[in-house]
Structure formats: C-alpha cells, structure tokens
Amino acid sequence: MALRHDWTKEEILEIYNKPFMELLYEAATIHRQHHDPNTVQVSTLLSIKTGGCPEDCGYCPQAARYHTDLEGNDLMSINQVKAQALRAKASGSSRVCMGAAWRNVKDGEEFDNVLEMVRTINKLDMEVCCTLGMLTENQAQRLAEAGLYAYNHNLDSSEEYYKEVISTRGYQDRLDTIGNVRKTNVTVCSGGIIGMGESEADRAGMLVALSTLNPQPESVPINALVPVEGTPLEEQKPVPIWDMIRMVATTRIVMPETQVRLSAGRTQMSREGQAMCFFAGANSIFAGDKLLTTPNPDVSEDMEMFKMLGLNPQKPFVKKSQPESVDAQNSKFQAQGEKPKWSRPGHKIDRNLEAQQKAKTKA
Ligand code: SF4
C-alpha cells in the first residue's frame, strides 16, 4: 500500500481507539510488511553539552530557569565523545545521538567541534545523529557534509498543545528546522512526548503533523514523560503502559516505513510492556543508564531482555539509504525536461505538476 500523507485527526483517533487486540494485530501486520520484527536498533544518546538552556520546555530539567538537581556541563571534548562512542559500539549500539542543550546552533568554535565529532563517529562506522536545537539551512548543509546521518528535532505534541508546554519558540520554528534538514541528505528524526497533560486528540494531532510531512520522518521517537522535580510538569502522573502501546501502534500504522523509537520512560515500563511495544511496531530503543539527563535501563538489562525475546540489535545503515537532497531530486526532474517536483522550503509535492503528468499519461 502506498504511503499516505493525508491522514486526518479523526482517522488517527479512530485507529488509536480501536479495540486493543484489533489495533495490535493491524500494527503488527504492517510492521512485518515493512520491517524485520525480530530486529531492534540500539542507539546511544550522549549529552555533549548539558543544562543552561535558555528555552522553557516545561518537561526539561536542562532549562536554566527551572531549579532542578541537574549538574550542567560545557561541551565535551572530541576525545571524550570518541571514547563514549567506542564504548557504545562495543555494547551493541549502531547509532550515536549527540544532544546539546542549545536554543539554536551558533556558527563558531563550538559548532566546528561538533562537526569534527560527527566526522569522528562517522569513521567508526556508526550512524551519527545530532539534536542541537534550531538550525539554518547552511548549518544543516555543513552537518550533512561532515557525514551526519540524522538530525533530531521533536515536534513534542500537537500544534495546539505545544503552546501549553513551550513559549520561547513556536511550532513553525520547529517545522522550519525540519524543512532545513530536508534540504540536505540528512534523515529526519522527529517525534514527541506523551503524558504532559495532553488529550488523545493532541496525540493524534502530533501524528497528523508528522505523517503529513512528505517525506515522512525516517525516525519517530515516542517518549513517555519522565517528570522531573523542579520542572513545571513535575506533578504529572505516569503514562499508563496501554497508552504507550496504543501510541506506538498508531504511529506504526500511519508511518509504516519509519523507525519507531521507544524512547524516554522505559524505566517505568515492565519487560512485558516493552515486548508489547516491540510487537506493536517499535523497532528502536536508547541504551545506556541515562537518556540525556533522565534514568534509563542499564545496557546489560536490555541485552538480557533482547535474549529473552529473541531480538537482534540492528546493524548500522541497514535501513533505507539516506534520501537524496531536494536539489538532487529536482536536477533529475529537470534533466528529464520536467519542472522541479519538490518545492523549497517545505517539500510539498507540486499538485499541478502531478495533475499535468496524469493528463500527459492519459493522452
Ligand atoms: S528540551 Fe532542549 S530546547 Fe527545550 S529546554 Fe531542554 S535542552 Fe533546551
């Protein structure tokens, strides 16, 4: 079945609220059509610069304005990053994601160092991902040239609920950064968090925003909020495992080819709960005892779980190769005497062009 980019909130809500067994069966079936159900990617998230962030994301202990126990750190050295990446590789990770608590990337020495970190991890034959805040098109291009495989920039929630959680930048800012990444051959990783007080309609709204991107993100992390004392969301109740499974299954159904990442909140989940998430279509976890700043299961516990479930860690670069940049795609269309199919920015299919092509075929 062709990928759909026109999902509506109503359709997604209907999927999310299906009888549980129906939902699980449908998601698992789609998962098997597009992925090996016994393979799960293990990724390592590395906080290369911790705390002191000027933003006000209500869930985040790294925001300078909240009073939490978090100890901040300046940017790590390239050697420290290399050592951690080697350790991650030795324990089965095929991807390293480097996170810096920045509002946006600033050109200069620190960014140059991050570019060198990207080159260094690339040489270790691991997928390298960054999450550094907002990016310009030029910065995205420089990361691509350094060999970045993926850029993470979460939408966090629906456009409506986003404003309840973050006020220092808007939803469109997020989409613009994703658009800038899409202009390169770097893959897009973008997802969100459940358990922040949002409604089911907001969860569906977030999946509408992600699934109607064209192309859909290659990777979608689904996080369960880990409430941290001192942040505005410290009082939120834990996310029921059933909600997590429903969210994973719905994500799998509306974005069949995407790598669905079971991210923050795994320490609150039983192994049985995680197994159901894998069955419903999750095919990646983050390893290591910390997920940026919040607790995460130990690698050895995860490997025990993999053994028990007969799961194999995914090798790097086995998923689809990186997408061609918009410019490369457009050059091909132009070489064939056609107008560029992809517009900049935003990657929307030119509907008129599609109509013209259909008319040509009929003629
Ligand atoms: S989520 Fe990122 S941008 Fe928001 S406060 Fe935390 S580090 Fe800053």
Image (tube, rainbow, N blue to C red):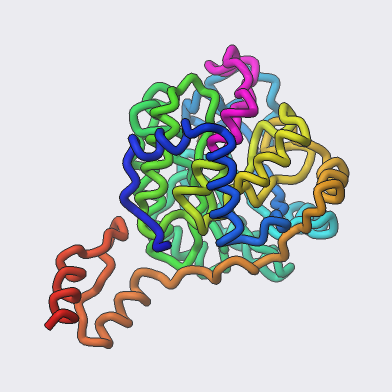
Task: Name the spot of residue 272 as percent of width and height, x first.
Answer: 76, 35
Give the vertical position of 128 relative to 223 (above or below).
Answer: below
Q: How many marks?
A: 0
**Residue 357 in magenta stretch:** no
In this rendered view, identify the residue nearer to me: 235 or 170: 235
Is residue 75 in view? no
Task: Name the spot of residue 61 as percent of width and height, x first.
Answer: 61, 26
Q: Residue at x 53, y 16 (%)?
A: 232
Task: Name the spot of residue 93 as percent of width and height, x first.
Answer: 75, 56
Q: Residue at x 52, y 55 (%)?
A: 258
* In the image, farthest residue toward the top: 235
Dividing the picture into quadrants, the one containing residue 225 is top right
Dividing the picture into quadrants, the one containing residue 324 is bottom left
In this rendered view, identify the residue nearer to me: 300 or 136: 300
Q: Residue at x 33, y 35 (%)?
A: 10
Q: In this rendering, would 138 be left or right of 229? A: left
Q: Residue at x 60, y 49 (%)?
A: 28
Task: Name the spot of residue 246 as percent of width and height, x first.
Answer: 55, 35
Dividing the picture into quadrants, the one containing residue 236 is top right
Give the vertical position of 5 relative to 60 (above or below).
Answer: below
**Magenta region, residue range:** 222-248
In this rendered view, identify the residue nearer to me: 47 or 73: 47
